[in-house]
Image (spheres, rainbow, N blue to C red):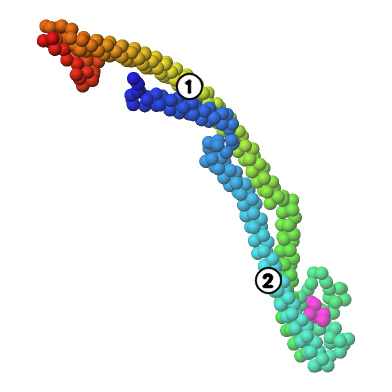
Amino acid sequence: MQIKMGNNENQMIHTNLQTQEKAAGEGGRKASGQQKKATIFAGDLPLHKDSITLRRQQAQKKAKKFVQDAWDTDRKADQSQEEIRARQRDQWDEALYNQKRVQECLDRKENLRQEYGVDADSQEQQDLELLMKGAHLDPGNPLTEEEKARLDELQGQPLTEYQKKCMEINDEQFIFENRKQSAASYAAYLQSSLTDMKIERLKFHKMADAQNNADKVLEQAGKDIQGMLMEEAKDHIDESYEETREEAEKQAEEEEAQEEKVELRKEQQELMEERIEAVREDSYDAEAAQKNQEKSARDEAAFLRDMAEAGLDVAGSGSAVQAEIKDMLNKMKLLEADIKGIDVDAQI
């Protein structure tokens, strides 16, 4: 007789084995993950990028303002110098124009002298030159006593036609000379202003100072950002350590619970195997008893058959014997066909 375990029992045992293997695999993966978390990469730090970016932008803005202010000051100074240079060029042009007019007046007077045939060393020419000098005195070239005396003498004398024309031209020449001198003086003054501005700019070095200040601001910002990064990393390491510790405790609790479950399932499996073995042994005993009963029944049936064939008188007991034989066959779960032909005649 064979004993077959039910599908439910097989499935339960198979499921238990799969559960144990899965638990072992998950435990290994979690342990590996726990080991990986022991290493912290700087790229994984959840840094406050907005605050760092803001600090960098503020430093750049401040540094840019230093340079921009210095640049604006220099640009204004350059613009002012350029305006001065432009005015200076205009004044030099004005001075040159009037100088040309003065030279034209001189040329006209020389042409008149030649036209009138006046000798350069003549008294007429010398008196003309004294009259022109006295008409527009130059503080840098004053009259001598002799020149003053001769000039007084000439005041009551009429002028020649040549002298009159030359005196008119000399008045024009005086105007042009004044304009030329005024333009030249103003141009010289502007040149002096440009020189003073250049010297002043060389004293302060605004662009160099501004660049130095900008570099200092950016350097300090770099140090501040580095400090922020270090602080963020420290905080993250502390948080990661706390999370790792909590996860390790949780993992230990889960592993302990899993071990308890595995131990319980192991005990259940052992109990089940004990029960199966007991059922198997009971079945073997029952099968052996049944075989013994079958053998006894056959022996008894053979005995009764032998009695009947020998002509023994068993009157009045045939029905009871047959009934007992049938009952015995039922107990052995045998068919009547197995003992066909066994019949006790009550009349014998």
User: For this rendering, which residue is in front, 117 or 157?
Assistant: 117
Which marked residue is nearer to the observer: mark 1 or mark 2? Answer: 1
Whether 132 is among the magenta residues is yes
User: Of marks 1 and 2, which one's residue comes earlier in the chain?
Assistant: 2
Seen at 52% across and 28% down, the residue is: 28
Q: Position of residue 143 (x, y in %)?
A: 83, 73
Q: Which residue is mark 1?
A: 255
Which amino acid type is marked by label 2? Asp
In the rendered image, the vertical position of residue 85 relative to residue 286, given as above or below: below
Element marked by disc 1: helix
Total residue callouts? 2
Element marked by disc 2: helix
Q: Quadrant of the C terminus?
A: top left
- Which region of the structure is painted magenta? 129-134
Q: Position of residue 115 (x, y in %)?
A: 80, 93
Q: Position of residue 156 (x, y in %)?
A: 78, 83
**Labelled disc at residue 212:** none
In the rendered image, the vertical position of residue 302 relative to residue 4, given as above or below: above
Q: Which residue is mark 2?
A: 90
